[in-house]
Amino acid sequence: MKQEILFKLGVGHPWADSVQYYPVIHSTNDEAKILAEANAPQGTVLIADKQLGGRGRMGNSFFSPEDAGIYMSVILRPSCHVTELMHLTCAVAVAMCDAMEAATGYRPSVKWINDLVARGKKLGGILTELSTSPSGQIRYAVVGIGINCNQTEADFPDELRPIATSLQMITGKPVDRSLLAAKMIQFLENLSQNLLAEKSAILDVYRHDCITIGQDVRVIQQSRERFGKAIDLLDDGSLQVRFLDGSVEAVQSGLVHVRTLQGYC
Ligand code: BTN
């Protein structure tokens, strides 16, 4: 797998020497954080064929069966304050839509903030973890991406079957996982160069890819549940919601659950 990825990445790619491959791992994000603490450089890429403890946001697990998906984490070291990086998950989502489109011809959508979706089901997700100095400067960011590639419906456990899908199920064709992994690395490297300078353009693409904007949503904050409509994405990645009482609020990811009113998406 590693040699195929490097071949498809092309000669002289700046991150080629930092690609690390694991047949099986607990979680590429956990391992990436260990490497980042040990000063691994920006562009260190970890790819596994299987995860035993793949993690998602909000304490969820990420189903990571052998050879069926892509489980990747990348270490980034942007030199900025955490407040300038609130759009990172959105930017990675755009890069992953670009990578899937380049590798398969199919462009998925995004469910705010970090879910990659297709036809109302989850194709994958992004888990961003930041380490900052006491003053809030970024020490490193670990960006973890999981994409369901070649699963069939029967491969998903009962509880995921109604809400999960794979690129193969969507396109009807098996996915060349090493090609997709190479495209993901290429678009992430490109993103690492444009992350701050191109923020506004990146967020415009996100607004276009994001199916949550314009939908009726249920916002669950601690034990409080409110209904409204998602009206926009703000520059810090928060979702602007107009609630039924007319008030408009920016909803931050991590603090609340946002559910659309039509099932998973
Ligand atoms: C989510 O669905 O909330 C995010 C899922 C992120 C899964 C990826 S797989 C590679 C990396 N390692 C992990 O443990 N999680 C991320």
Image (tube, rainbow, N blue to C red):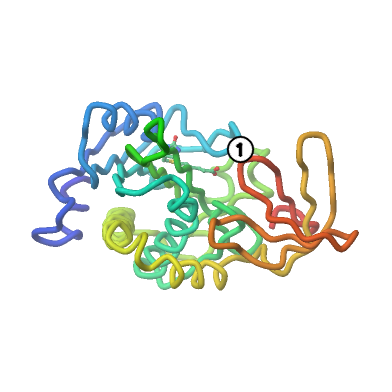
Residue nearer the viewer, 121 or 217: 217
- Is residue 156 visible to the viewer in this orientation of the structure? yes
Determine which quarter of the picture holds residue 37: top left
Q: Is residue 1 above or below residue 187?
A: above
Left or right: residue 208 versus residue 190 is: right
| Horizontal and vertical percent position of residue 165 | 57, 54
Q: Is residue 183 above or below residue 147?
A: below
- Is residue 150 visible to the viewer in this orientation of the structure? no
Per the image, the residue denoted by label 1 is 157
Give the residue drawn at x 74%, y 56%.
249
Determine which quarter of the picture holds residue 215: bottom right
Determine which quarter of the picture holds residue 188: bottom left
- Count the labels in the image: 1
Left or right: residue 15 versus residue 246 is: left
Residue nearer the viewer, 102 or 173: 102
Q: Residue furthest left?
A: 12
Residue nearer the viewer, 174 or 98: 98
Q: Residue furthest right?
A: 245
Disc 1, SS:
loop
| Horizontal and vertical percent position of residue 2 | 20, 45
Q: Amino acid at mark 1?
A: Pro
Label 1 crowd (10 A; few <14 / some 14-19 / many >=20): few
Q: Is residue 245 above or below residue 219?
A: below
Whether label 1 lies within 8 Å of ligand 1 gets the answer no
| Horizontal and vertical percent position of residue 1 | 23, 46
Give the residue drawn at x 30%, y 56%.
192
Residue nearer the viewer, 135 or 179: 135
